[in-house]
Amino acid sequence: MEEITTLTVHELSKKLENKELTSEKIVEAYAKRIEEKEKDVGAFVTVTAQQALEEAKRIDSENIDRENNKYAGIPIGIKDNICTKGVKTTCSSKMLENFVAPYDATVTQKINSEMLPSLGKLNMDEFAMGSSTENSAIKVTHNPWDLNKVPGGSSGGSAAAVAANMVPWALGSDTGGSIREPASFCGVVGLKPTYGLVSRYGLVAFASSLDQIGPITKDVEDSAILLNMIAGHDEMDSTSYDIPKIDYTASLKNDIKGKKIGVPKEFFGEGINEEVKTKLREAIEIYKELGAVVEDCSLDVAEYSLATYYIIACAEASSNLGRFDGIRYGYRAKDFSNLKELFTNSRTEAFGDEVKRRIILGTYVLSSGYYDAYYKKAQKVRTLVKNKFDECFKKYDVLLTPVAPTTAFEIGSKLNNPMEMYLADICTVSINIASVPAISIPCGVDSKGMPIGMQLIGNRFNEETILNVAYAFEQKIEFRENYKPSC
């Protein structure tokens, strides 16, 4: 049973095609794995293994055409801020603890059409606000490489479930690094697509101009496969781009000779752990061996991107979460004597500390007298960040940086220091501000055996290039073959 759960999706697909496995056997193996490991890892908010098993049996009984339905019957996990009809979508918050979505998100519809049974909804920082999944109102998720450490966030449940072989792949969402950072901490692959490539319809909004759904997988090929499924224009999302359909798996080639890789020196400065820097330098040497042209460059955005991100993200969060008031949506307080008390008590009781902190900050920067000083200025800096990236991509195909300043930290070690927690996002937030794609892939482990992630950034709608460059590196170092989580 365990052997099945260690396979990648493309390996499972071949076994289905060759009739070495059935969908039922695959889902059974994952259901058993969840039963064994969930008590230690805590990746799931809701487990739907029984429904997945019934769906797998139906797929097997229909004897479907495997040539046109290569991945039918291979299960998936879904972050709990993506709507799933008839299944709870809690955003790991008391505010939505009993919310059952009446409709499917567009990405959910797409994976349903591919016949991927859902194993359940995965834990996250409440309303996707956090970098450790400690802000969940449901439970704390543990890192499968070391159960005393965080899995990253906010898509920590998705990354931990993939790393612990409880799901073969998962959907996450990324507002400022929420796919890439947990992928880095958990030694898996996380892809943040270009803003607008994947529909946000049915994603519970945190910061609408920054949020993006993307895949978390065991390897780069699986990321390309899942991106093929979920990418595409959607009339239900006004920010969705209408671009020609691309087969991202076609870009998975070992040949990267002549590719120009820029290494922004600002991302390797003070605050970046020495072991992280060492592994990234080793990765740079591997790229040179593979024939890429690697050069140091300047991308002076990291320092002011963090402040810009937290102003814009909190402002949009303040606006988006205004609807959760005890009347229109969400939890309703039992004790109140008037309408104002109902609003206040419902939001006070149902929102966690981090969500309250961001709502307060967002309301402040949007308030009269401060809008021009903070929010308007942050939007101007956003344009500056986009322009800086545009300049770099005139010269380079890909930019290479760390994903996070450190490897996964101890659970509880940063909870009382929000500023230190926010600094964990310093390498990732500028990518969301600039609306460009980026992928996190493991490039080794530190002296304590914890995974280190490398970030490859591409120009808008140029996912093919970063997948190509990531795939070539992955094939060279064979991370999955050489390193395994302890759980």
Image (cartoon, rainbow, N blue to C red):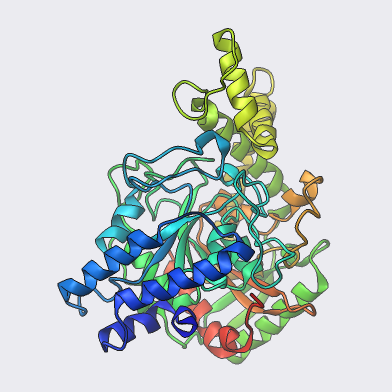
Figure quadrant of residue 169? bottom left
Q: Nearer the viewer, residue 222 or 102?
A: 102
Above or below, 363 relative to 403 = above
* Left or right: 40 as drawn, with respect to 74: right
Figure quadrant of residue 19? bottom left
* Left or right: 13 as drawn, with respect to 354: left
Q: Quadrant of the N terminus?
A: bottom left
* Left or right: 440 as drawn, with respect to 50: right
Figure quadrant of residue 221? bottom left
Give x and y (percent) for residue 475: 52, 87
Tell me what residue is drawn at x 42 percent, y 81 percent: 252
Tell me what residue is drawn at x 16 percent, y 76 percent: 63
Tell me what residue is drawn at x 50 percent, y 75 percent: 218
Above or below, 288 relative to 485 = below
Residue placed furthest toward the top: 338
Give x and y (percent) for residue 97: 51, 39
Q: Nearer the viewer, residue 164 or 127?
A: 164
